[in-house]
Image: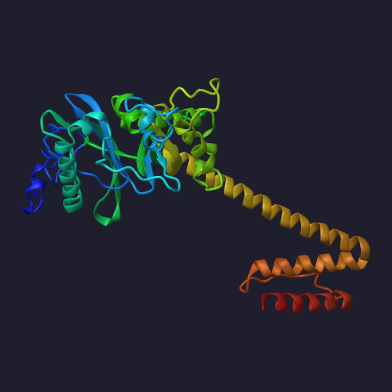
Amino acid sequence: MPLIPTFIERLINKTNRNKKRAEVSSERNYSVSEFGFFTELLPGRVKVIERGGEFIRCIMSYEGHAFRGELQKEDVKNRIGRNDDAYWEVRETTYGKKDSHPLPWDESWMKIAFFLFAFPWWLWKRWVFKTTGYVFTGIYPFQRVRTYPLEYFKKLKRGGGEEEIIRIEDYSDHFRVADFQFPVRVPSADTKDKIPVRVFIELMARVFNPYQTAYWIDDWSSRLSAATVDGVTHFTRAREYDNVISIMDPANSRDLSTEIAKIGNKNKTKHDRQENSVHAIGIKISQALVIDISPVREEDGKRLGELARARVDRDSAIERAEGRAAEIDKQAAAVSRNGAMGLAVLAAERNVRTASAAGDKAIVVIGNGGDTDPIQAAILHELKKQNEGTQQ
C-alpha cells in the first residue's frame, strides 16, 4: 500500500475534513471527522491514541526530546508506569539517550510470545512511516486518534493592509510540545478609575505534558484564554488608566508580561497557589507579548487626547515662563552691578524691543524729542549691532 500513490493519503485522519476550504468562521457548523488508519505527525507535536475511548499511548516526533518514562526505563527502582501521567511528560534527551519514536518496540512478554507475528508487523509499520511519513494508528473505528474542539483568535489582513482579529472554532488532533503562539483578545477590562481598555496579548506557550492537557481539562484552549483574561483584569483593576496605557512602553510592558506568565509557571509553594494556573493541565507559558492596549469607548480616547495636549501646552507655557524669568533675572543683576548705566541700557533695550515688535510700517518715537543723549545713542548703536548679529 505505501507504494501506491495517494492511497494512504486517503486513509489518514483529518479532523476538519468536513469544513469548507475557503470558510473562515467563528462557529463550528460542521461535524468532526475521526476516520483514519494513519496519521501525519509533524515535528514538535504529540498525538494521543485511544481504543474505545480509553487511552493507549502518546506518539511524538520531536528531535532532542523524549517522554520521561522512556528515559527512566533503565532505572528499575524509579520506573514510571505508562498509566501514570508523569510518564508522558516531555523532556530533553541527554547524551546517550534516544529520542522518542512514534512506533517504539514494545518489549512486553506478550510481544515476545507472539514474536513471529509481532516483529514483521512492527517492521511493516516502521517501513510505512519511513516511506510515507505517516504513522499507522490502528483499525478504525476501534482505534483512533483523539480529537477535541479548539478555539483561538486569528489575525487576518484585509484590503489596504488593515488587520482584523477574528475568533476561530474548529477541531484538532494534536498537542504542540514545541513553543507555539496563542493570541488572546480581552474586549473590555476595567481600570482603577473605571475607564475600560481593550487588550490584545500574544502568548508564547507549550504543552509539556500532553496526557494532562488531554484528560485533565475538557477544553484547554478555553481554559488558557479564560486564565489570561482573568490575569489581565486582575492587573488593570489595580492601576489607573494612565499607568495601564504606559504598558505599551517597552520599559513597562514587562510588568503585565510577568503577571500573565505566572499563570503558566509552577507554584513554588503550596501557599503561593494560582487559582487560574494552567500549569496544572500541562501547559507552560514562557512569554506574554502585549500587542495593543486602547480605550474601549471612542469618547474616552478623545477626552484623554485633549488632556494629553493640555498637559503639553501647560508644560510648554511653564518652560517659556521660566526662560523669560531667567532673562529678567540676568537683566536685573546687570542693572544692579552697573547702576545708572545699567538702567540706561535696560531702557534702550526696551525701546529696541518696542520698535522690533511694531514692525517696518509703524512709527515709533523713542525719547522725548529733545537732544539725543550721546551715551544712549552709543548704547542704541551697540544693541543694534548685536541684534543684527543675532538675526544672522
Q: Position of residue 272 (x, y in %)?
A: 54, 23
Residue placed most toward the observer, 109 or 210? 109
Residue placed most toward the observer, 47 or 241? 47
Residue placed most toward the observer, 211 or 167? 211
Q: What residue appears at the point 30 percent right and 49 percent down from the top-left corner?
A: 163
Quarter of the image where one finds residue 379:
bottom right
Left or right position of 353 against 257: right
Residue placed most toward the observer, 200 or 38? 38
Q: Position of residue 243 (x, y in %)?
A: 55, 37
Q: Position of residue 292 (x, y in %)?
A: 42, 43
Farthest top residue in view: 271
Q: What residue appears at the point 62 percent right and 74 percent down from the top-left corner?
A: 360
Picture layout, residue 226 above or below residue 354: above
Q: Position of residue 223 (x, y in %)?
A: 35, 28
Left or right position of 147 against 385: left
- Whether residue 339 is visible to the viewer of this picture, yes or no, is no
**The C terminus - image quarter:** bottom right
Left or right position of 21 against 234: left
Q: What residue appears at the point 92 percent right and 66 percent down from the top-left corner?
A: 338
Q: What residue appears at the point 54 percent right and 32 percent down from the top-left corner?
A: 240
Picture layout, residue 202 above or below residue 280: below
Picture layout, residue 13 above or below residue 338: above
